[in-house]
Image (cartoon, grey):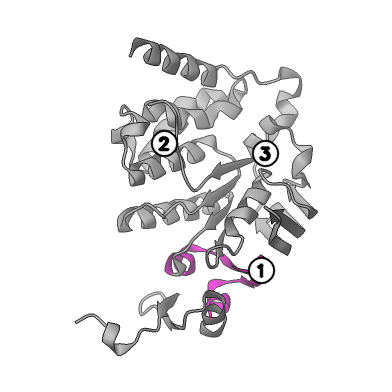
């Protein structure tokens, strides 16, 4: 137990002490994005994994001040596209740019200041306290003037995700939904101008699904660019500025939710008949599967 505690303390100290090269500190720290500026762009991207084409000529643009939802059936290429935009997966053809430069031209520390990534699953080998897990998101800023805000950013991220009461608990002792909120808090604390979130609502209850998408909208309103992979088309319709529908490794449609979320397209892509109705209060599209009468609730 003591050795484990010592290891946790050492890792936490390392997170705080990651050296930031002073010679390039000023140039490495990104400034705010101009409204509507291109934060990331994939052009003609092709990716094959395990010998199977996963993305085939994908074009997508991510802009500051916008929430872009990536939707589509399982295996359509959503998570792969997110990983390509993050620079975590290389494309066999095409180009990906982040903040105006090819993603591979950035060093790892520089890229970490420009984009924050939330993977589908969050796991840690050791039971770090939640507060330290969130603080790991501040590692890219170590040695920069912005590091003075570490405590404030960690506290703000925990509060925003309703995880402040979990701060002292071991991450490994949390439920799946609690882990998801803490992982998101780490990404928010990183304060990168481009957020790439892979199914952030999958493990969450109804309240926290709404909370996460409201946070996405808040970050976009503050000038950041947000890309979020979603399976819930209702959430995409309610909170996204644009929706890109992926189908068999290609973008089948890209545009405002009301233009993209149409019954013929969705029925074909998902291989499930759907009907699309306007929300009675907001007018946002509501996508409902067509069910046989004998499957209706009593």
- Judged left or right of residue 74, residue 19 is right
Which one is in front, 10 or 222? Answer: 10
Left or right: 173 in relation to 18: left
Dot 1 or dot 2: first in sequence order is 2
Crowding at mark 3 (Cα within 10 Å: few <14, some 14-19, many 20+): few
Give the SS element for disc 3.
Answer: loop
Determine whether 67 is above or below 280 in the image: above
The answer for how far apart the CA atoms under marks 3 and 2 are is 21 Å
Q: Residue at x 58, y 71 (%)?
A: 256
User: In the picture shown, does residue 221 fall above or below 126?
Assistant: below
Q: Is residue 123 left or right of residue 248?
A: left
Q: Check if residue 131 falls in the magenta segment.
A: no
Mark 2 neighbour class, 10 Å CA radius: few under 14, some 14 to 19, many 20 or more = some
Looking at the image, tell me whether mark 1 or mark 3 is earlier in sequence order.
3
* Region in magenta: 234-262
The spot of residue 56 in percent (x, y) is 73, 64
Q: Is residue 64 visible?
A: no
Above or below for 189 versus 141: below
* Quarter residue 268 falls in: bottom right
Where disc 1 sits, the SS reads strand
The residue pinned by badge 3 equals 31
176 relative position to 38: left or right: left
Q: Is residue 247 magenta?
A: yes
Q: Which mark is residue 251?
A: 1
Give whichever of discs 3 and 2 has the lower sequence position.
Answer: 3
- Say what secondary structure mark 2 lies in: helix
Name the residue rendered at 47%, 36% in the picture: 186
């Amino acid at each position: 137990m003591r050795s484990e505690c010592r290891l946790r303390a050492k890792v936490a100290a390392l997170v705080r002490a990651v050296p930031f090269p002073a010679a390039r500190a000023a140039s490495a720290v990104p400034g705010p994005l101009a409204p509507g500026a291109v934060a990331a762009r994939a052009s003609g991207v092709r990716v094959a994994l395990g010998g199977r084409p996963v993305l085939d000529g994908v074009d997508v643009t991510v802009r500051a001040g916008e929430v872009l939802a990536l939707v589509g059936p399982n295996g359509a290429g959503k998570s792969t596209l997110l990983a390509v935009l993050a620079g975590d997966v290389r494309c066999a053809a095409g180009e990906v740019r982040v903040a105006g430069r090819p993603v591979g031209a950035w060093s790892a520390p520089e890229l970490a200041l420009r984009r924050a990534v939330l993977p589908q699953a969050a796991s840690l080998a050791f039971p770090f306290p939640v507060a330290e897990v969130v603080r790991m998101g501040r590692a890219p800023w170590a040695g920069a003037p912005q590091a003075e805000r570490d405590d404030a950013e960690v506290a703000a991220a925990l509060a925003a995700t309703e995880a402040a009461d979990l701060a002292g608990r071991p991450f490994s002792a949390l439920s799946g939904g609690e882990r998801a909120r803490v992982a998101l808090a780490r990404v928010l604390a990183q304060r990168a101008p481009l957020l790439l979130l892979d199914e952030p609502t999958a493990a969450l209850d109804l309240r926290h699904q709404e909370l996460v998408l409201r946070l996405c909208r808040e970050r976009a309103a503050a000038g950041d660019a947000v890309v979020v992979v979603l399976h819930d088309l209702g959430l995409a319709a309610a909170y996204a500025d644009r929706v890109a529908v992926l189908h068999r490794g290609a973008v089948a449609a890209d545009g405002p939710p009301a233009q993209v979320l149409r019954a013929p397209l969705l029925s074909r892509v998902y291989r499930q008949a759907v009907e699309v109705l306007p929300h009675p209060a907001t007018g946002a599209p509501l996508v409902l599967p067509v069910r046989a009468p004998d499957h209706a609730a009593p």
